[in-house]
Amino acid sequence: MKKYVLLLLLVSSSLLAQEKYTTVVVPKQFMFQKEANQYGLNDLCKLFFEKEGFQVLQETDVMTDEMFNNRCEYLYVDLIKDKGFLTTKMTVELKDCKKNVVLKGTESVTKEKNFDKAHSEVTRETLVSLRGKLNISKSIQEKEVSNKTEAKNEVIVIKEEIKQSTNATELSSSNNEGLSLEITKNGYNLIDENKDTKFELLKTSNPTIFIAKKGTLQGIFTLNGQISKFEYYQNNELIVEKVEVKF
């Protein structure tokens, strides 16, 4: 009988461990970086985990009371850069509050000579290697959906009112699907499979809002973990294009 009780306790502990990891913390600066968000890697990590369904917190110099009290309910993102001759090597690790490695990505290697492109490429590849291993408990997802139902409905109503008042036209185009992020000095380029630049994005004070250019069109680009969109005016009409951004 005792064996059965022990087995049930172990199973319960395992389920609790699954449930607590719904939030990750991304640092302002990794150990190998010379400045905060060098090469745009910290923003890249934040965007990836948001797309995977996690709540992402930015690490601050002074931890708030809430963060301190909940620090062992978070996973902490770390990028490990390995020295290589004429190569750039990167591995992502997820650690618990005791610095134990909970999950480790596959090491990515490139011979790309451009530092910005090289760091972006290996970081993206090692992050993608985590896909399929970042399971969030179904019970938690249902709870979050339930808690946000009312707010979600309110957002939908607001969007409909705005659409009616501004006569916004929503567009979907196959040319806006499967675009990849390429880090630039002042933001990002969104490129297709042929490495052709489709969008030029310039940073603003809001990390998810960019001044955007697509050919001769200029507007505002909203980049986040679920939906990206490009908004601009054409012939005095507000156009909203849906854009799929991948890693």
Image: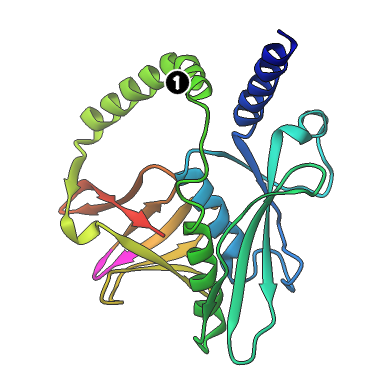
Q: Is 247 drawn above or below residue 196 in the view shown? A: above
How many neighbours does mark 1 have within 10 angstroms: few (below 14), some (14-19), or many (20 or more)?
few
| In-image side of 8 versus 153 (left or right) | right
Q: Residue at x 49, y 64 (%)?
A: 124
Q: Which residues are magenta?
A: 213-217
Quarter that holds the N terminus: top right
| In-image side of 10 versus 66 (left or right) | left
Quarter that holds the C terminus: bottom left
Res 194 → quadrant:
bottom left
- Give how far across and how far down residue 24 sits, in percent: 64, 42
Q: How is the image coloured?
A: rainbow
Q: Is 38 drawn above or below residue 163 in the view shown? A: below
Check if residue 100 falls in the magenta segment: no
Check if residue 216 falls in the magenta segment: yes
Q: Residue at x 73, y 48 (%)?
A: 59
Q: Can I make out residue 130 in this image? A: yes
Q: Nearer the viewer, residue 196 or 213?
A: 196
SS at mark 1 in the image: helix
Type of amino acid at the residue the image marks with label 1 = Val
Decide whether the magenta segment is chiefly helix, strand or loop.
Answer: strand
| In-image side of 219 versus 63 (left or right) | left
Q: Circle 1 sits on which residue?
A: 145
Q: Is 17 drawn above or below residue 111 in the view shown? A: above
Q: Nearer the viewer, residue 207 or 180?
A: 180
Q: Nearer the viewer, residue 192 or 4?
A: 4
Q: How many marks?
A: 1
Res 38 → quadrant:
bottom right
Q: Residue furthest top?
A: 1
- Give how far across and how far down residue 225 sits, in percent: 45, 45
Q: Nearer the viewer, residue 187 or 33?
A: 33
